[in-house]
């Protein structure tokens, strides 16, 4: 079975009635399963995670979008999170037995149908983008909902699907295809966040600004000297976890084939050891593809031939994924949830 994940973000974080209708809109969709539904009142936004085959995920995305379009009114919306429309962003993510190009085609099919049915302008981003300036979501969303009417007058911002006519109720939508993002945190046995922050800077691809012995940023011609980060396709920072009296190196692995989970873990351990801090384990926030854990299991198997269950169990053990709370395979591995 082909498995596609879709993680649409909608501009509503408070209305329980709307949430129930959105969930109900997916109940009758064949081969599409709701995996998580996470509203945030401060952001006034809900993040939905669902998965299915190529037909089910397209129908599911369209169905929940229709409900959102009926229920959400952007003229009354305020929230902390950047947004451009009621159906703000709809990414399609290849999980198993499906290519990125196929997910691009799904996003295009979604854009064509949703733009016509809902009378909204739709932009393609990430791997579906047709121009470099539209690859980055933040670039497309610049100006947000409040600036969209003026933006649509600019020929350079003509939507990829739909017309340039501003829809006050719904605003605009961004869709496309991207790789699976793994939210991954490594636990440090220290309450001093400076160690986690330093390691996060060293790990992340964007690196950090070089400093002198007094801690001042070194600049040449007014530009800070940047030290490249160690790991590609990684975003990282240090955070405190007061509940557990620890700190974490918090990372987003935007392509686990380029930087696998186990490589991120082992590199953090190296830096923690240099700083004299103990790594107690790690955690995966949200869902993870089976393939990512199998890669880790094979790494730690030392060449032994193990079955799938043994590889996954070995990865969980060696990465310390149950350090803070039990890692339940059927709740965390997206392939096992379908």
Image (spheres, rainbow, N blue to C red):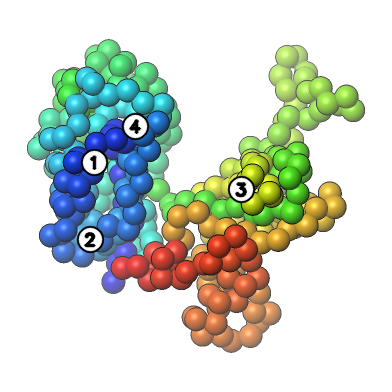
Residue closer to the observer: 200 or 327: 327
Cα gap from disc 1 to disc 4, whole angstroms = 12 Å
Cα gap from disc 4 to disc 2, whole angstroms = 25 Å
The answer to whether one can see residue 148 in this image is yes
Residue 108 percent coordinates (x, y): 23, 45
Residue 273 percent coordinates (x, y): 82, 56
247 displayed left or right of 127 = right
Residue 51 percent coordinates (x, y): 30, 59
Cα gap from disc 4 to disc 3, whole angstroms = 25 Å
Q: Secondary structure at mark 3?
A: helix
Name the front one of labels 3 and 2. 3
Q: Secondary structure at mark 1?
A: helix
- Going from N to C along the chain, the mark reached first, 3 or 2, is 2
Cα gap from disc 1 to disc 2, whole angstroms = 22 Å
Label drawn at residue 32: 2
Name the front one of labels 4 and 3. 3
Tag 1 residue: 16
Label drawn at residue 243: 3
Tag 4 residue: 44
Cα gap from disc 3 to disc 1, whole angstroms = 29 Å
> Answer yes or no: do the residues labelled 4 and 2 have beta carbons within 8 Å?
no
Give the quarter of the image for residue 146: top left
- Structural crowding at the residue carrying mark 1, measured as other residues with C-alpha within 10 Å and reported as few (<14), some (14–19) or many (≥20): few
- Going from N to C along the chain, the mark reached first, 4 or 2, is 2
């Amino acid at each position: 079975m082909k498995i596609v994940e879709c993680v649409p973000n909608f501009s509503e974080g408070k209305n329980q009635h709307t949430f129930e209708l959105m969930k109900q809109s997916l109940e009758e969709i064949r081969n599409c399963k709701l995996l998580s539904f996470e509203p945030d009142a401060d952001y006034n936004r809900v993040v939905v995670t669902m998965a299915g085959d190529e037909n089910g995920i397209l129908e599911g995305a369209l169905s929940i979008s229709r409900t959102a379009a009926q229920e959400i009114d952007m003229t009354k919306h305020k929230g902390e999170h950047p947004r451009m429309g009621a159906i703000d962003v709809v990414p399609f993510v290849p999980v198993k037995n499906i290519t990125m190009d196929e997910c691009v085609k799904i996003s295009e099919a979604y854009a064509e149908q949703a733009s016509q049915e809902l009378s909204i302008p739709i932009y393609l981003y990430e791997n579906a983008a047709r121009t470099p300036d539209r690859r980055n979501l933040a670039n497309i969303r610049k100006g947000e909902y409040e600036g969209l009417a003026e933006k649509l007058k600019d020929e350079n911002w003509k939507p990829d699907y739909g017309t340039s006519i501003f829809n006050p109720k719904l605003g605009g939508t961004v869709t496309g295809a991207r790789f699976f993002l793994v939210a991954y945190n490594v636990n440090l046995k220290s309450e001093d966040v400076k160690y986690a922050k330093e390691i996060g800077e060293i790990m992340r691809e964007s690196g950090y600004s070089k400093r002198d012995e007094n801690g001042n940023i070194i600049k040449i011609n007014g530009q800070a000297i940047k030290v490249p980060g160690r790991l590609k396709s990684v975003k990282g920072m240090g955070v405190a976890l007061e509940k557990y009296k620890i700190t974490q190196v918090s990372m987003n692995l935007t392509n686990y084939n380029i930087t696998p989970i186990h490589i991120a873990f082992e590199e953090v351990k190296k830096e923690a050891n240099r700083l004299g801090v103990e790594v107690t384990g790690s955690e995966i926030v949200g869902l993870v593809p089976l393939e990512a854990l199998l890669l880790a299991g094979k790494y730690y198997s030392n060449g032994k031939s193990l079955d799938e269950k043994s590889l996954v169990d070995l990865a969980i053990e060696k990465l310390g994924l149950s350090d803070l709370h039990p890692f339940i395979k059927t709740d965390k591995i997206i392939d096992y949830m379908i």
